Amino acid sequence: MIDINNITVRYPGSADENPAISSFDLHLNSGEYIALLGANGSGKSTLIKALCGLIEIEKGEIIVDGKNVRAGRFGDDFFGIVAAVFQEPGGQFLMSTVEREIVAVLQNLGLTLEDQERRFKNVVKRFSLENILYRKPENLSGGQMQIVNLACAAAISPRVLLLDEPMTFLDTSYRESMLDMIDEFYRDGLTIMHVTQYPDEALRAGKAAIMDCGALIAVGEPESILGDEECLRRCRLVMPKRLLCKKKLGFDYADAGAMESHCLKIGYSNAALRTDSPEKIENGDLILKAINIGFAYPDGSFTLAIDRLNLCRGGVTGLIGPAGSGKSTLAFLLAGLLKPLSGEIIIDGLPLPKYENKKLREKAGISWQMPEAILVGPTVADDLWLIIDNLRLVDVDLKEILRRTNLAGYEDRMVDSLSGGEKRKVSLAGALVADPELIILDEPSAFLDPYSQIELIEIIKDSARAGKTILLIGHDLPFLAEVSDRIIGISGGRLMFDLPSLEFFNEPAYLEPLGLSAEPLIELRHRLVQKGIEMKNPSIDPAYLAGCLEPRTFK
């Protein structure tokens, strides 16, 4: 079904002499499902673009369903046969509303009106789109955009499905349902290529493959490929948490019976549980105070009402909630990019409207959820110097900023040739150039390979130690557990809770008022806490949990 024969791809105009993909071969039979992993810049997204005819290949050929893929002619040759969902969710919309987007896809298939209506109703119900059908795509959250993109791909009823990190902006509930849907497509006989930075997602595929520096490093059965620690280390990847849990703990994280037996064996039974409710964390030197904030989009599609939000100097706060709950809207308000309709936002003692642009950026910097919207290039250095010049900043050590964000050597790289993870690093660098007091990172771990996530955690910790205030917005709970000291939940534009991280990650029930499904590792941690196992860190990493499971001794 898919034959990739010795292809080489090089981005035109790039200062990097190395090709993005070099002498790459891969063959998929009809009905196969392969998960593709690799570090940032390894060539995964470039491969998807080549498969879709979006970029020229320097040599070799790609054959899909018996036809050669020709750059710029993909729609003519493969519409209705191949569907793709790209990692940049906002770039696939052409119509003014979600409804029209789906209808346009169905009309282009040449279906009868009766078939169009039947398929439309099925897609809307299957993807739970009823509440956003008449919303403008640009007013959707990143997660909602990606759900619509997946719905449009499903509406085509393709034979081949190409997915480039489609789950990144989805909350835990939607992610699980979308993965189940991909499993269903697989059972129905679709040929699927799924690029992902989440190794546990890759375990669900029939095959797994690893790319590095534009080359195919390994391909085979997922547990075998993703259990090879040496190969993973060389390629800046990590073992899936499910496999790591089995290795470190001796049981699957979802196996409550095996956990129970293990705890009894090392001397743990049940412990007295806390019943008191934790207080909000608001002690310390306030850097930001938001009081009675009200906001609504002009079309009335979403309203936000925040009665009170305080952020303290040196604190790291995680803001979580379902897709479309208002997380990014709140981030824009706090960064001064949107103006509230009511209420007041005070940063470092001064209301936001009284700040000039330069002074505001010195107080609040933001790394966007979808950075491609603000990266203008043409090179990484050009993009960052544009920010520096616009803010009239002086004495900015750009080399040090690039070093801190692990972008040293990227100065002359063309922005358009960067991977999603690399673009995220450039956005982070842009947020840091003015050395702001408040740093807002919207989905900071999105598209980052595991090693880049570890590097970002150190940047966040170093910034907090230096007295910076960090607000992290996202769905990646394992990432937030490693770095946050406080978790705030938001749903429907309202704050639902404000908890110490240790309390939040000990109790999966806190996800219920947000409408989010429980993270299996939070459930495992909860069960271990019930056994009296002490954990001083909110981490849900299997290696950390295993380290807390020391045999109990009795005196």
Image: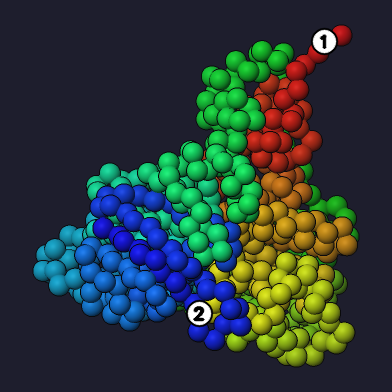
Q: Residue at x 83, y 59 (%)?
A: 462
Q: Do residues under tags 2 and 1 come within 8 Å of each other at their CB atoms? A: no
Residue 546, image x and y in percent? 69, 30
Under circle 1, the secondary element is loop
Quick check: 453 left or right of 71? right
Under circle 2, the secondary element is loop
Image height of 307 relative to 546, above or below: below
**Residue 294 visible in the snapshot:** no
Residue 90, image x and y in percent? 46, 73
**Quick one: quadrant of the N terminus?**
bottom left
Residue named by callout 2:
11
Residue 482, image x and y in percent? 71, 47
Image height of 517 relative to 64, above or below: above
Q: Which mark is residue 197?
A: none
Q: Residue at x 76, y 86 (%)?
A: 388
Q: Which residue is farthest top?
A: 555
**Residue 88 visible in the snapshot:** yes
Q: Given the image, on which type of amino acid does mark 2 rest?
A: Tyr
Query: What is the distance, in whole Å, between disc 2 and disc 1 at their CAs?
Result: 65 Å
Tell me the quarter of the picture where residue 236 sits. Answer: bottom right
Tell me the quarter of the picture where residue 337 sits. Answer: bottom right
Q: Residue at x 66, y 69 (%)?
A: 425
Q: Given the image, on which type of amino acid does mark 1 rest?
A: Phe
Residue named by callout 1:
554
Closest to the observer: 391 or 75? Answer: 75
Task: Tell me which label, 2 or 1, sits earlier in the chain.
Answer: 2
